[in-house]
Image (cartoon, rainbow, N blue to C red):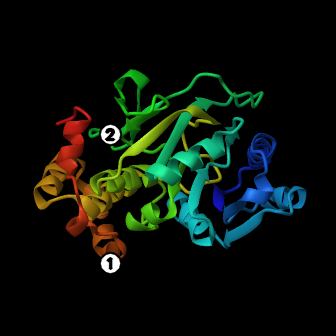
Amino acid sequence: MISICIPTCNEGENLRRTVDSLVANTPGLWKLHEVIIADDGSTDGSVEAVAAAYPQLRIARHPTPTGTSAAKALGADSARGTILVFLDSHTYVFPNAIDLLASVAGTHGIATPIVGRIDADTWQPSQDGGHGMFVDRQRWNCGWLELEKLQTTDLPDLRITYAIPGQSFAIRRDVYDSAGGWDRGLLGWGSDVSLSLRLWCLGYDLHHVIDARIAHLFRTKFPKNRPHVGWWQIYANQLRILASIATPEETADAEARLSKHGDALARAKQHLGATSATIPRLHLRLARSLTDYWTATNQA
């Protein structure tokens, strides 16, 4: 079974549009897949509306908002499939994209699509899009890579990329579990960065499927109905990610880069100390280091 997990929080009509495109462009959806709406405390009635339109949906709920990473984890926890597909609740699914991603993930562990843009006014998806991704060492977010910069494989429709697009990708369940899944302790930001680095350092190759296409409604800031994310939360997330996979030397280097942020960094360290017991620590199982990652992505 393929489990399609859609985390959402007060997405309004966007959620219905996402599910509409999924249903229209995924043959045999309800016979071969399950679709889970992971509701992160929505209060706008959008989840109830889409559930009424599509009673086949499975609904999992947080009573109050807990953040993006925890919402994605809720969907995974509720899933029964051997392949997990994650979709943001403001995406457009192109024909056969889900099955292409699931097929590659079943063989290779992880599969990522081309990601285009949705026009916010017309909800029309673009026909172009970004291919590969990488974690930016300076900004600690995911940036795009041109197709020509991705490593080729023996198969013409697959490339090797360096980060997952958090809004849409597929992963085999055993690979997801091996990496510790989504980190529920992250504060509003960084779920894709965290999981990407953990997967890569564990030795998994992230496969980009050049024939699978998803479009996404990109935003320049968090919606007004979401909790505010400040700088100290961003730094706390960086430190938490480092605690999962970094050597003491790699952590010291990163903290030196953040040292100019004074009070915000101090608050981040205090939060990290209070929540350290929940960090997915993978050091004894790593096949590659964070330093190897910066070298592989030309950021050493």
**Label 1's element?**
helix
**Amino acid residing under circle 2:** Arg
Q: Residue furthest right?
A: 53
Q: In what quadrant of the picture does the N terminus appear?
A: bottom right
In the visual, does 183 lie left or right of 22?
left
> Which is nearer the eye, 53 or 14?
53
Of all residues, the one furthest to the left in this rendering is: 249
Dot 2 lies on which element?
Answer: loop
Residue located beneath label 1 in the image = 277
Picture layout, residue 30 above or below residue 101: below
Is residue 167 visible in the rendered image? The answer is no
Hey, which residue is sitting farthest bottom in the picture?
277
Residue 216 lies, in percent from the top left, at: 62, 37
Residue 132's x, y, as percent?
A: 43, 33
Q: Which residue is mark 2?
A: 139
Q: Residue 16, position in %: x, y?
A: 80, 48
Q: Which residue is at a point 69% across and 62% down the rendered structure image?
A: 36
Real-space Cα separation, disc 2 to disc 1, in angstroms:
26 Å
Q: Is residue 81 above or below residue 136?
A: below
Which quadrant: the C terminus?
top left
At label 1, which amino acid type do we have? Ala
How packed mark 2 is, by other alpha carbons closer than 10 Å (few <14, some 14-19, many 20 or more), is few
Tag 2–tag 1 contact (CB < 8 Å):
no
Residue in the picture at 33% in, 59% down = 236
Judge from the rendering whether residue 246 lies leftward or rightward of residue 5; answer left or right.
left
